[in-house]
Amino acid sequence: MRQATLQLKTRIQHIDIMNNNIEVRKIILNAILSIFVALAIWYVIILITMVVNIVERRTLEKKSLSLSNEVSNLELSYLSVSGSIDLPLSLSMGFKEAHANFATRKSLGSLKLTNNEI
């Protein structure tokens, strides 16, 4: 009787270990699949942001080109107008010639250096 009880206990323990092993395998499989799904979603999100950034860069390049053309036109008009500005035109517009007075300081003395032959 005792021997049958020991055999039953060992069989029950082995069956329990096998059932736990199946459960552990299911848990590991579910974890691997969920990690794979999470990585796939992350990859798709990265691809979408890359495409959006590419499209945005192209629109910004077009805006940059149009602004560059506008700056070139403004520079050209500035150069054409700046050539015609002279003193009589500025006087006729009400500007006056500035006479600048600068503050100066008298020297405090002179400094004589001796020749060191080092």
Image: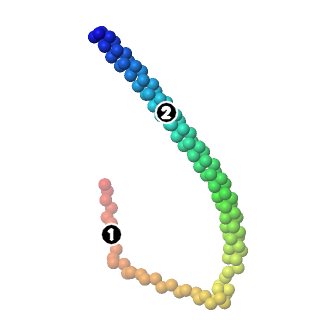
Spot occupied by residue 30 in the image (x, y as percentages of width and height): 49, 33
In whole angstroms, how far apart are the C-alphas of marks 2 and 1? 91 Å
Disc sitting over residue 112 in the figure: 1
Front one among 67 and 77 = 67
Task: Tell me if 84 is positioned left or right of 5 in this view.
Answer: right
Count all numbered tags in the image, as a single digit.
2
Secondary structure type for disc 1: loop
Residue 79 visible: no
Q: How crowded is mark 2: few (under 14 residues within 10 Å), some or many (20 or more)?
A: few
Residue 54, numbered circle? none
Residue nearest the observer in this picture, 69 or 79? 69
Above or below — where is 70 with respect to 11? Answer: below
Going by the numbered disc 1, the residue's amino acid type is Lys
Q: Residue at x 40, y 19 (%)?
A: 15
Q: Position of residue 64 (x, y in %)?
A: 65, 60
Mark number, residue 30: 2
Residue 118 on image: x %, y %: 31, 54
Q: Residue at x 53, y 86 (%)?
A: 99
Q: Nearer the viewer, residue 98 or 2?
A: 2
Sequence-first tag of 2 and 1: 2
Q: Position of residue 109 (x, y in %)?
A: 33, 76
